Image (cartoon, rainbow, N blue to C red):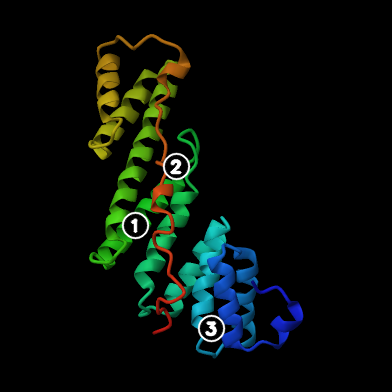
Amino acid sequence: MFSDESETVQAGPEALAINGLDEFTHAEYSSALKIFQEIQERFPFSSYSLMAELKSADCHYYLGHYTEAITAYEDFAKNHPTNEATPYIYFQIGMCHFRKVDTIDRDPGSATDAETAFEKLIRLYPTSPYTEEAKARIKDCRDFLAGHELYVARFYMKTEKVEQSITRLEYLLDNYPDSSVAPQAQELLAQLQAGTPPKGKWRDWIPEIGLPDWSIFGDFGRISPDQPSSSK
């Protein structure tokens, strides 16, 4: 792999690109990021600069720098609106938000942002290779958001704020009728409206819901070094 700094300074854009992709392929994302950034800084008008711009965003994503990655992907989409990688860019923006989703008792904003991003991809590129997974991610985002609403409703129930709890449950059922927690919400709503709230420990009321383990997808969505991505 590429590690000699003196060679990096002297290398041309093609050599840097080869070494950057090699680092990226071997999951050395920090090293790859430095090389791709150098290509952009030293050779902004070379044929490798566009590739380096996209791969820099990918490096941020795989390093878990999701805020930086979102900015980089959005800049790429803005600067190169007709690039063939644009569907991938929109998918990755959604994935950045998706990876930022926390537990159901936290701010659900990232799940909402992820759903919005995936819906934009499907709307603009309905036949892209990323559409089917985007649909699956949307379903999980909506399940997560429904779970958050159920969590809040149960919190209100615990604190004896029945009207607020009923309002959240009605909102859940109106907006997420097909979610996995909808049957629980319907049952709880009926009990509250009947004046017979369930008895139990607080921990028993917390829905066990979170985002799924998507590790089975492995490198899904990653652009390989051989895949063209430099056309505008």
CA gap, disc 1 and disc 3: 27 Å
- Between tags 1 and 2, which lies in front? 1
CA gap, disc 3 and disc 2: 36 Å
- Mark 2 lies on a secondary structure that is loop
- Mark 1 lies on a secondary structure that is helix
Dot 3, how many residues are within 10 Å of its Cα: few (below 14), some (14-19), or many (20+)?
A: many
Q: Quadrant of the N terminus?
A: bottom right
- Between tags 3 and 2, which lies in front? 3
List the residue tagged with mark 2: 108
Circle number at residue 118:
1
For the residue marked with disc 3, what is the amino acid? Ser
Residue 47 pos. (x, y %): 50, 89
Dot 2, how many residues are within 10 Å of its Cα: few (below 14), some (14-19), or many (20+)?
A: some
**The quarter of the displayed image where residue 7 is located:** bottom right
Residue extending furthest toward the front:
1
- Mark 3 lies on a secondary structure that is helix
Vertical relation: 163 (above or below) 82: above
List the residue tagged with mark 3: 49
Vertical relation: 194 (above or below) 176: above
Vertical relation: 220 (above or below) 77: above
